[in-house]
Image (cartoon, rainbow, N blue to C red):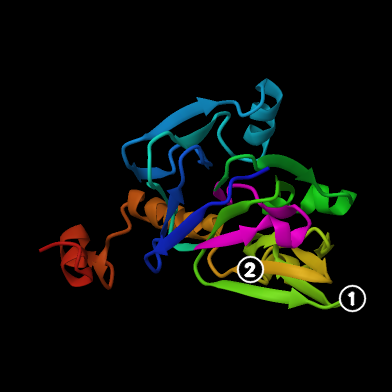
């Protein structure tokens, strides 16, 4: 049974969540997510249930170890966790979804002590082979509150019975276990090669809650990598191909 924890979310695009703990309460978090903690809170790092559970978390993109922050003082104790990249922190009440919720790998930020992080392989071969970021999903299991993180702007949708939505696999953050999930080929030679999108889409069928993100981390990382690669090739050619890095840098604002 998960602890009942209170919380506050601070910030807009680079958020953090501050958890308030009563004596004996704890919160579990991915290693390296903690920002600050008050006196009386003890860190207990372990595999969270044995070597097998540690390896399962590694497969989903999480750390082999998980840290529990347990409040051993009196009154109230506070510990905070920061989002790893620009986006939003989403609180999820697992009780409202039958005690479990599915999310993208790396989406988990922290949760009440007692909530487990498991692998949720998709049931269909197409989703398994071509799901990309959606292939390996995390299943959060328990009866408490968990926090997941997503990039950019977050959209929450409530799918009705039989209602279908096709989503870029990277833009799918999390969904209720009542939602059916599969992968669909975009179709068409030109669409696949020149459409600018992925070759496969996630197909979601209701009923249930889904969360979407406008800025998947993979998309952000690709742009950063492309820019870094461009810079490393010495592409600063200034105006109309002359002037070199100095003139080009002055115009672009890179140099003073």
SS for dot 1: loop
Disc 1: CA contacts within 10 A as few (<14), some (14-19) or many (>=20): few
Residue 96 lies in the magenta-colored region = yes
44 on left or right of 111: left
Q: Which mark is residue 92?
A: none
Q: Is residue 227 above or below residue 137?
A: below
Q: Residue at x 69, y 29 (%)?
A: 53
Residue tagged 2: 212
Q: Is residue 119 above or below residue 227?
A: above
Relative depth, front residue between 81 and 153: 81
Residue tagged 1: 162
Relative depth, front residue between 48 and 129: 48
Q: Residue at x 38, y 52 (%)?
A: 228
Q: Residue at x 46, y 47 (%)?
A: 21
Give how far apart the Cα atoms at labels 1 and 2 are: 19 Å
203 on left or right of 15: right
Residue 125 x, y percent position in the rendering = 89, 49
């Amino acid at each position: 049974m998960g602890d009942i924890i209170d919380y506050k979310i601070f910030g807009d695009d680079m958020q953090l969540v501050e958890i308030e703990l009563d004596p004996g309460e704890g919160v579990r978090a991915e290693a390296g997510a903690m920002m600050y903690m008050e006196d009386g809170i003890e860190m207990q790092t372990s595999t969270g249930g044995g070597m097998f559970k540690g390896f399962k978390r590694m497969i989903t993109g999480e750390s082999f170890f998980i840290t529990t922050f347990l409040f051993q003082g009196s009154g109230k104790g506070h510990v905070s966790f920061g989002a790893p990249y620009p986006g939003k922190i989403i609180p999820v009440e697992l009780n409202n979804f039958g005690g479990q919720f599915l999310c993208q790998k790396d989406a988990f930020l922290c949760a009440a002590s007692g909530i487990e992080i498991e692998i949720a392989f998709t049931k269909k071969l197409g989703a398994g082979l071509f799901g990309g970021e959606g292939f390996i999903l995390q299943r959060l299991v328990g009866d408490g509150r968990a926090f997941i993180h997503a990039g950019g702007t977050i959209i929450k949708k409530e799918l009705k019975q039989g209602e279908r939505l096709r989503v870029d696999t990277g833009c799918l953050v999390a969904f209720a276990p009542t939602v059916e999930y599969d992968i669909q080929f975009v179709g068409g030679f030109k669409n696949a090669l020149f459409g600018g999108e992925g070759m496969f889409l996630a197909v979601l069928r209701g009923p249930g809650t889904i969360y979407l993100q406008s800025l998947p981390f993979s998309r952000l990382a690709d742009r950063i990598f492309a820019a870094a690669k461009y810079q490393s090739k010495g592409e600063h050619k200034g105006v109309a191909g002359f002037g070199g890095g100095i003139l080009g840098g002055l115009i672009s604002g890179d140099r003073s």
